[in-house]
């Protein structure tokens, strides 16, 4: 990804230098103070990618196996797992090819490596966009199920869900192709940053509104049972904690990457921004961590899915 200043491009492996041995290094900055640079070992990239790969494959297998999970919400969760799966596969593939090139095991021409690098960049960018969109789709689905419960099955139908899924995948592929083709245009980067901000705002508004409605409902039940204070406080704290984890994980894992994109547009030559650019690998690692956490938040909390997952694991043994 040339526009991102990525330190993980395959072409760099054709003329590589030995990596730093320390996880934290101070990168020299000619026009300012030294920068703290976090070096992510290739082994860590591979480990995170493989963990995410296994987790998301299990989610897809469980949803595919159990017909009770063949609903719009679980299809969105399945597509989110596929998106996270592609993020993991692309990063594992890139890391593996880089290690083979550095070790001299894989010998190929620069043109071939360039094409492979472009394919991996398309996979990474497309899977990131689709992951963000499916997170938004899951939030909208849950919102409709709470505020329009009686009309949910007439509003969120399987044909509509399939059309939404198809539209997200097509948009993700087109976005990734545009991004790779016109990576030097600031408008493309701003569009990606805008997508992140839009999804963050959408999820925050919907989930906060859902929490408020749930607290209101719990308060009403408490009044009927004449136990208003304990139930309301306990439920409110639990809901607030869940909301904080959901939005906090999303922001912490995705925020640094899109901050990186924003700074490319706002201050590409500034020394302070240059310090942030040097930690691009850390931002990619955080996105892979998000691919590990997503199944825990959106999939494995379902008792039906966990039961199916146990059956899948038992069958595999």
Image (spheres, rainbow, N blue to C red):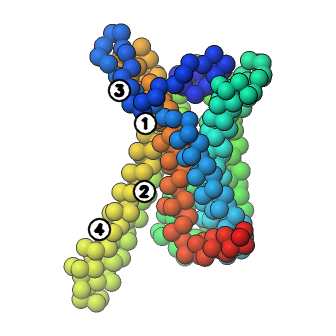
Asked if disc 4 and disc 2 are in contact, CB closer than 8 Å, the reply is no
Count neighbours of disc 4 (C-alpha within 10 A) and say few if under 14, some if 14 to 19, many if 20 or more: few
> Furthest residue to the bottom?
225
The answer to whether any part of residue 269 appears in the image is: yes
Residue closest to the eye, 74 or 252: 252
Q: Residues within 10 Å of mark 1 (few under 14, many from 20)?
A: some
In the image, residue 126 above or below residue 158: above
Of labels 3 and 2, earlier in sequence is 3
* Element carrying mark 1: helix
Q: Name the residue beneath numbered marker 4.
A: 237
Mark 2 lies on residue? 246
In which image quadrant can residue 91 be found?
A: top right
Which residue does the image show at 48% across and 34% down from the upper left? 40
- Secondary structure under the numbered disc 4 in the rendered image: helix
| Mark with earlier residue (4, 3) | 3
The image shows residue 35 at horizontal and vertical percentages of 34, 22
Disc 3: which residue = 36
Q: Position of residue 31 (x, y in %)?
A: 33, 9
Mark 1 vs mark 2: which is more N-terminal?
A: 2
């Amino acid at each position: 990804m040339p526009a991102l200043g990525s330190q993980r491009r395959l072409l760099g492996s054709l003329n590589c230098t030995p990596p730093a041995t320390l996880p934290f290094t101070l990168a020299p900055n000619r026009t300012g103070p030294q920068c703290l640079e976090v070096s992510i070992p290739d082994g860590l990239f591979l480990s995170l990618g493989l963990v995410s790969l296994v987790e998301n494959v299990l989610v897809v297998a469980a949803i595919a196996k159990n017909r009770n999970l063949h609903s719009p919400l679980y299809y969105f969760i399945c597509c989110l797992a596929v998106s996270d799966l592609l993020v993991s596969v692309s990063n594992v593939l890139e890391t593996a090819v880089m290690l083979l090139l550095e070790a001299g095991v894989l010998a190929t021409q620069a043109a071939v490596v360039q094409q492979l690098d472009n394919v991996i960049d398309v996979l990474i960018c497309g899977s990131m966009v689709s992951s963000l969109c499916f997170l938004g789709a899951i939030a909208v689905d849950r919102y409709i199920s709470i505020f329009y419960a009686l009309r949910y099955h007439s509003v969120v139908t399987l044909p509509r869900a399939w059309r939404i899924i198809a539209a997200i995948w097509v948009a993700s592929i087109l976005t990734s192709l545009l991004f790779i083709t016109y990576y030097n245009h600031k408008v493309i980067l701003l569009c990606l940053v805008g997508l992140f901000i839009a999804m963050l705002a959408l999820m925050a508004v919907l989930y906060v509104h859902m929490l408020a409605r749930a607290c209101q409902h719990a308060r009403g039940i408490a009044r009927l049972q004449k136990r208003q204070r304990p139930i309301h406080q306990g439920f409110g704290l639990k809901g607030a904690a869940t909301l904080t984890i959901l939005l906090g994980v999303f922001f912490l894992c995705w925020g640094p990457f899109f901050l990186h994109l924003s700074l490319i547009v706002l201050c590409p030559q500034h020394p302070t921004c240059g310090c942030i650019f040097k930690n691009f690998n850390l931002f990619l690692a955080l996105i892979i961590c998000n691919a590990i956490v997503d199944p825990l938040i959106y999939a494995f909390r379902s008792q039906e899915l966990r039961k199916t997952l146990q059956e899948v694991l038992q069958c595999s043994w």
